[in-house]
Structures are given as structure tokens and as C-alpha cells.
Image (cartoon, rainbow, N blue to C red):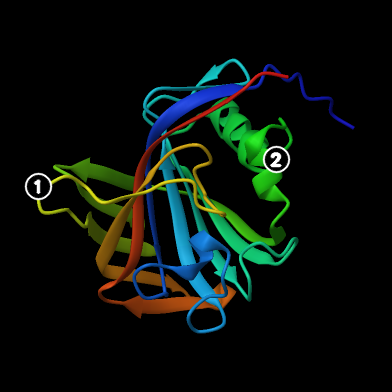
Amino acid sequence: MTTITNTGYDFQGQLLEACSCDVLCPCWIGENPDSGACYAFNAYNFDPGEINGVDVTGLSYVRVVIIPGNVLAAKTWKIVQYVDERATPEQERAILDAFEGRLGGPLADFWGLIDEVLATHRAPIDHETVNGKGRLRVGDAVYAEMEPYRGPDGSVTTLHNSLFSTIAGAPAYVSKAQTHTVALPQYGMEWSYTDRNAIQSDYRFTYRP
């Protein structure tokens, strides 16, 4: 068995997330998805980032998800995960060690929700946030465009202290995805939505064992 030297992680960047629920997704307050199941993706870029002593700045990680019921039920999610094709083998290993929970901390807690990894792929990932608008493209598999809601003064509408969050400790920007398409029929993941729930955030994950 390979022993992992663990120095933890410290990375930040932008989260882009969209799902099949109406705005706002009930999962964030621990309620059941609108249609009984939630079809989603979570996309993280690292700007900057260090994982287990490896610099991952400028790279991205994306998880395409089927949640069959309540989001908080342990060992229920099925995922296909993508690592930025620009990652070296060392960077890819560091990213997967963190997001698959082997390094501990909040990402290990999050990994407890996942039942099955259907596949892990490398792919070109285009993850952009410009003037509050987010766009994600993962090869030919995922495409989405989204932008946040804003208050009367033009400030972004935020969600704080929700029961569930893919970005523990950071406020989420309540958003709408004008386009959200996933084309992975080989894994039973094939959907296309317009004007459904989306979340954006500036986040930071820090853990030192």
C-alpha cells in the first residue's frame, strides 16, 4: 500500500455550480431536490493553490453529479470527475488526493456523501468568471453559462450560513444558469436545462493536519 505524505492544502478560486432544481435549489437548506433527484456539476478552479506541497495554480477540477435524494444522505452521490488536462501527473494526483478525501479536512467530510465514482477523466476545462458572469466548458461533456442575481443597488445576492454547502465557510452568490448541458450518456448522465438554479462563489479551502 502506498503511503501518502500529507501536508494538507491551501487553495482558493471560483466555484461554478448548476443543477436541475429551480432557483433556489432546496439542497442548500437541506431539503429534498425539486424533482426528487438533483442533476448537477461542481467546478472549482485554483487561483492560487497548493495541495500537499504541489502548486496547482491555474488548474481546474469538475465533478458531474447525480444526487438521488436528500443531499445530506451519506454515500448516495454518483459522480464522474474531471481533472484539467494541463495537469502534470503529480498535480493530478494531488488534486484527486484532496477531493477524494485522502488528505483529510473539509474535503474528506464532503467525500463522505459520495457512493460511486463512475469515471475519472482528463479534459480541457474552460472555467471563466467575468464581470460576475460564469462560464464552464469541459471538453464535449459539459457546458454552462450563468450569472448572479443582484439587489436594487446592483450588489450580488448572497447566501450565508446554509445547512449544506459545496464551499464550506464561504458565501454563495445566488445565480441562474441560462444554459446547463451535460452529455455523458455512457454513464447515464445526459440532460439540458435552461434558467435553472446556479451558484457561484469565491472560496478558500485550508487544512493542515
Q: Residue under label 2, please give it.
A: 108
Comes first in the chain, label 1 or label 2: 2
Q: Amino acid at mark 2?
A: Ala
Quick one: label 2, few (<14), some, or many (20+) residues within 10 Å?
some
Residue 16 image point, x, y percent: 36, 50
Q: Amino acid at mark 1?
A: Asp
Instruction: Look at the picture and state if 137 lies above or below 108.
Output: below
Instruction: Look at the picture and state if 118 lies above or below 161.
Output: below
Tell me the distance, in whole angstroms, between the alpha carbons under discs 1 and 2. Answer: 39 Å
Judged from the image, the secondary structure of the residue bearing numbered disc 2 is: helix
Seen from this angle, which residue lies furthest front?
152
Residue at 48 percent across and 26 percent down: it is: 11
Q: Residue under label 1, please give it.
A: 153
Left or right of residue 129: residue 95: right
Seen from this angle, which residue lies furthest bottom?
35
Q: Looking at the image, which is closer to me, 61 or 185?
A: 61
Left or right of residue 15: residue 122: right
Seen from this angle, which residue lies furthest left?
153
Residue at 34 percent across and 61 percent down: it is: 198
Residue 50 image point, x, y percent: 51, 20
Residue at 57 percent across and 75 percent down: it is: 32
